[in-house]
């Protein structure tokens, strides 16, 4: 990079090219691309500005602003940041639902075990009742005799 004697970066492009690059940079930062997919890449910057990569590379001050902005705000566009936030929220909700489903599955297994135990107890009681009713019970009073009131 070539700089001036006072340490400031100097653009080695025409004012018209510098204006095109700044306009393109602003559009990309604001999420309003005209000619690209809107990702914050230098390739998209020169394509948005409709200049060559070599011309863009001579705009040292503009590229320094570009790099500073990306260092401060990151490479994600507004749309990407919004999408990432939605994905993070959905992942959090999915984790909660998965945890809830796991809890319900455990309760269902416990209920299944309890119902099976009750079923087997009920069957044993039915068999015991059938066995008990099969035996003859001798009445206390002989048959055919009526009690007087």
Image (cartoon, grey):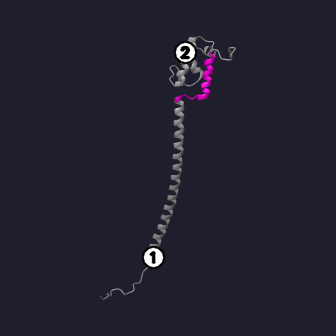
Residue 66 can be seen, yes or no: yes
Is residue 50 among the parts visible in the rendering? Answer: no
Residue furthest left as drawn: 149
Q: Quadrant of the C terminus?
A: bottom left
Question: How busy is the neighbourhood of tag 1: few (under 14 within 10 Å), some, or many (20 plus)?
Answer: few
Magenta stretch: includes residue 64: yes
**Helix, strand or loop under label 1:** helix
Quadrant containing the N terminus is top right
140 magenta-colored: no
Q: Residue at x 54, y 23 (%)?
A: 28
Judged from the image, the secondary structure of the residue bearing numbered disc 2 is: helix
Q: Is residue 98 above or below residue 146?
A: above
Mark 2, other Cα within 10 Å: few <14 / some 14–19 / many ≥20:
some
Which residue is found at the position 58% from the left and 17% from the top?
Answer: 46
> Residue at position x 52%, y 58% from top?
110
Query: Is 15 on the left or on the right of 149, as rendered?
Result: right
- Give residue 70's position: percent from left, percent from top: 60, 26
Residue 78 in percent (x, y) is at: 53, 29
Q: Which mark is residue 4?
A: none
Q: Earlier in the sequence, mark 2 or mark 1?
A: 2
Q: Which residues are magenta?
A: 59-78
**Cα separation between marks 2 and 1:** 101 Å
In this view, 121 is above or below 6: below
- Would you say the magenta stretch is mainly helix, strand or loop? helix
Residue carrying label 1: 132
Hey, which residue is sitting farthest front in the picture? Answer: 6
Q: Nearer the viewer, residue 38 or 143?
A: 38
Pinpoint residue 59: horizontal percent, then vertical percent. 62, 15
The spot of residue 104 in percent (x, y) is: 50, 52
Residue 20: image tag = 2
Q: Is residue 93 left or right of residue 56?
A: left
């Amino acid at each position: 990079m070539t700089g001036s004697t006072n340490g400031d970066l100097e653009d080695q492009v025409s004012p018209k090219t510098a204006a095109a690059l700044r306009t393109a940079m602003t559009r990309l930062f604001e999420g309003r691309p005209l000619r690209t997919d809107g990702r914050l890449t230098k390739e998209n910057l020169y394509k948005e500005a409709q200049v060559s990569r070599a011309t863009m590379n001579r705009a040292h001050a503009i590229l320094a602003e570009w790099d500073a902005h990306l260092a401060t705000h990151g490479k994600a566009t507004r749309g990407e940041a919004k999408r990432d936030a939605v994905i993070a929220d959905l992942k959090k909700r999915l984790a909660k639902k998965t945890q809830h489903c796991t809890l319900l599955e455990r309760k269902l297994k416990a209920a299944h075990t309890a119902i099976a135990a009750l079923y087997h107890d009920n069957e044993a009681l039915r068999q015991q009742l059938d066995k008990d009713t099969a035996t003859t019970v001798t009445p206390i009073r002989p048959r055919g005799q009526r009690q007087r009131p």
